Image: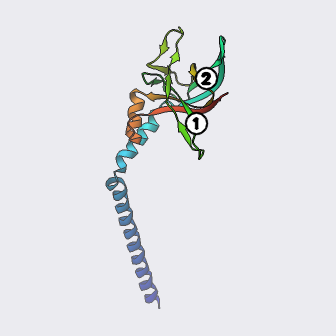
Amino acid sequence: MLHDHEKFKNILAGIQSLVISVAVVIGGVWTLITFNVLDQVAKARAELEVLQSRHSAIEIDIEASQVSLSDDQRKQCILASVVIKNTGTQNAVLEFQRDGPMAVTPVTFDKNGAPVYGETVRASIAGSNPRKTITTGTFVRAGSRSHYRILVPVQKPGVYFLTFSADATGSEAELSKKAAGARRQTWGAQLYFVVK
């Protein structure tokens, strides 16, 4: 009886060793497939580099109001107030499109109620001298905010779609390209506004 118990115990230990060995082999094969065949190693390294770099984090908000020109109440403008916040730990340089970072597009609606977008007008930010505009971009320090006002004349009352966008530059753009595979990292905000 004691001999049978010892024999059973040895068989059970052998089965246990076999199961553990099979599990280790399966785990190794799974790791090999996940990190080599699916090319996850390069992606994991790029994501880790982004996390370790502690990059800038840009938030952009748009508010708008309607203003009339003092000489003619029929001539209306949209006054867009744009706040760019850098909540990250690195300074950021943002690049604007040459014709301006603000796009204003009139919106009408077809007979089914679907939006129809008209011709987009782009606008630049006025600099400290109102006769000069900021056309190249802006520098936003880590932990700070920049406030800009953009005045855009509109032809008639209606709904307008406002979009403010700026591209990341330098090392942040490179890190974004590695991590996400995107050609450019673009920060932006959008808003629908009604001119009465």
Asked whether residue 147 is in view, the answer is: no
User: To which residue does mark 2 refer?
Assistant: 78
Are dots 2 and 1 in contact, CB under 8 Å?
Answer: no
The disc, 2 or 1, on the residue closer to the chain's N-terminal end is: 2
Foreground residue among 165 and 65: 65
Which residue type carries mark 1? Thr
In this rendering, would 176 be left or right of 123?
left
User: To which residue does mark 1 refer?
Assistant: 108
Which residue type carries mark 2? Ile
Give the x, y percent position of residue 145: 58, 22
Q: Is residue 156 above or below residue 28?
A: above
Residue at figure coordinates x 37%, y 50% from the top left: 40
Disc assigned to residue 33: none
Given the current orientation, which residue lies at the most extreme front position?
Answer: 111
Foreground residue among 11 and 152: 152
Residue at figure coordinates x 60%, y 33% from the top left: 192
Give the x, y percent position of residue 62: 60, 28
Query: Which of the 4 image quarters holds residue 130?
Result: top right
